[in-house]
Every structure is written in C-alpha cells, then in structure tokens.
Amino acid sequence: MTEEQKKNTEKKTDEKIVQEEKTEEKEKTEEKKEVNSGGEISMEKITSLLKDMMKGVKKYEDKNLEKIKVVENPPSIEEICERLKNDEFKNVVVMCGAGISVSAGIPDFRSADGLYKQLDGFELPYPEAIFDISYFKEKPEPFFRLAKNLYPGNFVPTKTHYFFKLLEQKGILQRVFTQNIDTLERVSGLSSDKIVEAHGSFGEATCQSCGAKYDHLEFKPTILKGEVPRCTKCKTGVVKPDIVFFGEGLPEKFWDLKKKDFPKADLLIVIGTSLVVQPFSTLINDVTDECPRLLINREVVGKFSEGNIYSFLMGGGSSGGFKFGRQDNSRDLKLIGDADEGIQKLVDLCGWSEEFEEILKHRNEILKTIKKKEEEKKENNEKKENDKQEKEEEKEK
C-alpha cells in the first residue's frame, strides 16, 4: 500500500468514526428530550443505555490498544515465587472462599456437587433462601438443620489455611479476607487481627429479639442437635450465629480494613472463590494497577468482560476483573486446579517446604486428636452394644 493509499484509508476510517459519533450524539439528544419531558424510562431503555455505554467503552479501549499495541506480558508463577523468596513482597493480601475448605470435608456452594445442590429435602423456595435473612425470620428451622453439619469443631484446616499462617510467620501477610464461616483460619493459628471474616462466622451469636450476645460454646449443643437455640435472657428470641445473611450488612471491620489494606497491597492472592457475591468480589478492583493478582482456583472466575456492565461501573474500564488473554494484561496470572495443590506448588517454588512441613505439624496433631476421639467413641458404642446384648441374653435365660 502506497503512502497516499494509506492516508486515504485513515481518512475514511476517521470519517466513519466522526459519522458514528454524530449519530450517537443525535440519539443521546433524543434521549435527553425524553427524560426532560417528564416521561418514565423503562427498564428496557435503561438496559439499552447501559449497553450503549459499554459499546463506547469497548470502542475507546480498542482504539487505545491499537495505538499502543500492548502484548500480554504478565509475570510468571516462577517470577512471583522468586520475588516472594527474595522478600520483595511486604504486604500480601489474600481473598479466599469455600474452595479452600473443600478438602477439609466442607462442600462449597455453587459447584456441581456443592451445598446448594444438596438442599432438596429442605423444601426451600430457592437454594439461597437458607441464607436469606427474610426467610430466616419466618422459618429458622432449615438453617439450623444445615448448621449442625457445618458447625466448627468437626473439621480440620487444610494446607491452604496453614499457608496463610506461613505468610504471617514470614512477616509479609497484610490480611486474609475470607468469605468462609467455618472459622478454620482461626483454628490454624492465624492471628485474629490478620483475619477479616467478611461474611461473619459461627464464632459468636446474637439474639434476634433483644440483641443479647453469646459465645458459640453456649449454643453449640443445641445447634448440634439441629434445634433452634432460644435466648436465655428474653426467653423468646432466636439466637442466630453472627453469619452475614443475604439482606444484611457486612461487618464494620470489613469496610475499615478494605480501605486500608488493598491500596497498599503489593501482591493479591485470590483462592477458592467463585467471585460471584457482591461486594466481596469487587475487592480485586481495589489494589493498585501495579499490584500482581494471582488466581488459584478450579476454574477461571472474575474475568473482565466488555459486556459486564457491573464490572465497568465498578471501575472495570481501567482496573476491573482479571484480564487473562487480553492485550493489556500486565499483572494477572492463574493456577487452575485444586487449592491445596496450587499452594504446594508455590511453597515448592519458593523453597519453603521444610518450614511448611513444620507448620503442618499443628494440623497433624489435630488429626491425631480427632482420630483418637473417633476411636474412643467407636469403642464406647461397641461397649454399649455388647452390654445391651448381654442384658437381653440374661433376660432370655
């Protein structure tokens, strides 16, 4: 192509863009007239406006990407581990979800064999209702039937939980923001000031009538029976664990520390979460553009999409969801697979295997204790059964 032909092509492209912009401006003017005239705007119209907005965002991004011709060049897992090994990261922030507790025997929520798929016998209007505060106020029984199977004390922290403890021990963990209510971060020995339980936990409970506070040990026996705990003070209120249900606000600690921690994070690790529940999922947008973001998950989640209106409104135009496969990806990387396996790979690449094994001794001790209790329980049950049979035989004689 000659220089003159090239100029003519560019001229035609510019003219086309100008024409499109004039058409869009005309449409916007008509829309403004419609709004100013006092007419109501339908949801279809709002959706159409948002889609047009996203088209504009995509056009702007495509135009700029073509100018700078950025080639995807995020750091590799090996490079991140080398920097961890060399103490280059000082403020590591972790975001985690139910996926990190699956190997402990606790089901996640949204997978094919997850918790929401196991609620057929609960007669719920929809699976999420079991964690809906409005439904709970009307019918608390289904939640407590489920709670006895999720209650802390029945499960042991996973390798992933102990990796957080390793980061703390090395002095580089800023915070762990967890969606989990199982308290396994606490059980692993992680300091309480390093944990933000974004969706609350079973650790404490509150009467829904008088507001009386309870430690989890006070209502544990009742919950393990699958019964509804009642307040011992007002005698009528339901004692609900301090888990954040749909329709409730998140703890103040979440809001306070998210403002403090994410802007100073120099490495963000996102692990075992579907990144579906708001506002937790938007936290990946709150780190700086220079902060590497590592996803360790069974599947890719939180991926930036030009058609994702929520991502755009939350800042997706510049620093939104993960940009895997995009030209402008300079910091997002992923390890797809099991959480514990991904963590073990990081540990091995960092050369931390011996230290990690030392920390895991705590887990092994818990496992031994649980195994011993199970054996004692089995022996007691066998003894009771034998005693029962002997009594029946004596009666027959």
Image (cartoon, rainbow, N blue to C red):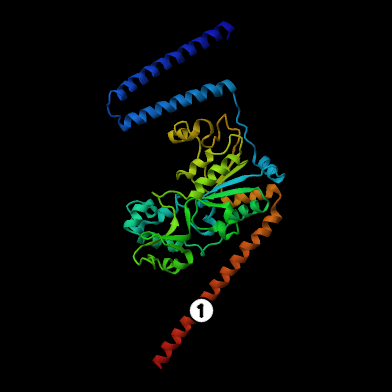
Which amino acid does the dot numbered 1 rest on?
A: Asn
Foreground residue, 194 or 331? 194
Kindly identify the residue that appears in the image at 68 percent across and 50 percent down.
348
Q: Is residue 298 visible?
A: no
Foreground residue, 145 or 171? 171
Q: Quadrant of the C terminus?
A: bottom left
Q: Quadrant of residue 6?
A: top right
Foreground residue, 351 or 359? 359
**In the shown orientation, is residue 209 left or right of residue 291?**
left
**In the shown orientation, is residue 7 left or right of residue 230?**
right
Could you say where residue 375 lies in the image, as x and y percent from the top left? 55, 73
**In the shown orientation, is residue 80 left or right of residue 15?**
right
Q: Quadrant of residue 25?
A: top left
Could you say where residue 300 lies in the image, as x and y percent from the top left? 52, 41
Q: Is residue 236 above or below residue 280?
A: below
Q: Is residue 199 visible?
A: yes
Foreground residue, 13 or 47? 47
Q: Residue furthest bottom?
A: 397
Q: Is residue 155 above or below residue 329?
A: below
Q: Is residue 239 above or below residue 294?
A: below
Number of numbered callouts drawn: 1
Using a 10 Å C-alpha cutoff, classify the residue at mark 1 as few (fewer than 14 neighbours), some (14 to 19) or many (20 or more): few
Q: State the SS at label 1.
A: helix
Kindly identify the residue that appears in the image at 70 percent across and 52 percent down.
352
Q: Is residue 151 above or below residue 330?
A: below
Could you say where residue 233 lies in the image, as x and y percent from the top left? 38, 67
**Residue at the disc numbered 1:** 380
Could you say where residue 83 lies in the image, as x and y percent from the top left? 69, 42
